[in-house]
Amino acid sequence: MGFPRKSFSLLLSVSLVSITIILGNFPHVATAADFTNLVFKGCADQKFQDPTGVYSQNLKTLLQTLVSQSSRRTFSTAASGEGANAITGLYQCRGDLTTSQCYSCVSKTPELSDKLCGKAVAARVQLSGCYLRYEVAGFKQVPETEFLYKVCGSSSQASSMRTELESKRETAFNMAEDGVKSGSSLFYTGDYQSVYVLGQCEGDLGTANCGDCVKTAFETAKEDCGDSVSAQVYLDKCYISYSYYPNGIPTISSGRGDTRERTQKTVAIAVGGVAGLGFIVVCLMCLKSVLNRRSKKHEG
């Protein structure tokens, strides 16, 4: 008894459509918190004395250059103007952002800088996923570990929870300190037993100095935020954050779309289903080939 060709073609089409549907319906991966949220701004008190407009033009050129560079790399420096009129600047994107996300983040900072700091001779705009800063020639330099800003979360209430937090947090902090020194991007994110931690240094900082900066930031978090279940600390050349989840770290993703275990399992199941359908299609194609050969014999 032969296999009707029309039925076979329909079955093959349905199988291929099924694969397309499964591939097109992977669960949407939730992204991390919006990386363009404003965290803080720092503006110098002194304003440009700019009767000829040279400072304004140099600043505009500098910011345009930095925004353009952010589409190709996550850290860069630039300068505009000469001598006493020169302005230098840089941006740093978080290490888990793509260059496209970095550009989206950095491109928002010039307008914010103008709105929040006006014609300040130096400014820094810190967003969740990046920061941009600039300064005129001769502006006073500060130490790499100069404290800039902090955010402390709520405090853990139970004494047992505080003890557990302090122990786990210390290990997570040490992991982050080692991580920023061993990685190529001066960035680390990871977790240890319900404590999620992140560390980021400025791109021109040496690895040893990066480790020292992050360590100082973590020490500041412990001293100033105490038993807070979360904190963010920003120093001049680095920043850190941590969050404690007593009931386990939720499924989250970085800017690059790397997801945690739950999403990985879901994708693995879906891929397994696709592989199974692929095997069925191969079998059907083999059957079609056999039927074609039989048909040719009968016609002959």
Image: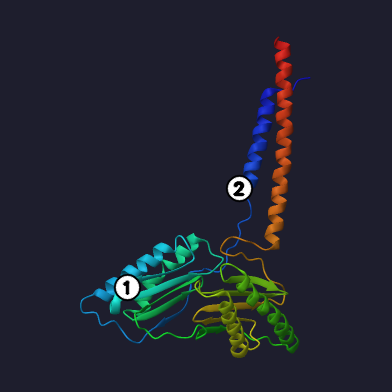
In the image, 43 versus 298, the foreground residue is 43
Left or right: 87 with respect to 285? left
* Residue drawn at 69 percent across, 87 percent down: 157
- Dividing the picture into quadrants, the one containing residue 107 is bottom left
In the image, 128 versus 248, the foreground residue is 128
The answer for how far apart the CA atoms under marks 2 and 1 are is: 46 Å
Compared to 251, does 138 lie above or below? below
Question: Split into 4 quadrants, where in the image is the N terminus?
Answer: top right
In the image, 161 versus 120, the foreground residue is 120
Disc 2 and disc 1 in contact, CB within 8 angstroms: no
* Residue drawn at 69 percent across, 44 percent down: 274
Residue 212 circle label: none
Residue 59 circle label: 1
Residue bearing mark 2: 24
* Residue drawn at 63 percent across, 55 percent down: 27
Left or right: 296 with respect to 154? right
Q: Residues within 10 Å of mark 1 (few under 14, many from 20)?
A: many
Can residue 200 be seen from the camera position used here? yes
Q: Position of residue 144 (x, y in %)?
A: 50, 82
Q: Which secondary structure, mark 2?
A: loop
Residue type at mark 2?
Gly
- Dividing the picture into quadrants, the one containing residue 280 is top right
Compared to 138, does 71 lie above or below? above
Q: Which secondary structure, mark 1?
A: helix
Residue type at mark 1?
Leu
Left or right: 279 with respect to 226? right
- Dividing the picture into quadrants, the one containing residue 191 is bottom right
Q: Residues within 10 Å of mark 2 (few under 14, many from 20)?
A: few
Q: Position of residue 246 (x, y in %)?
A: 71, 77
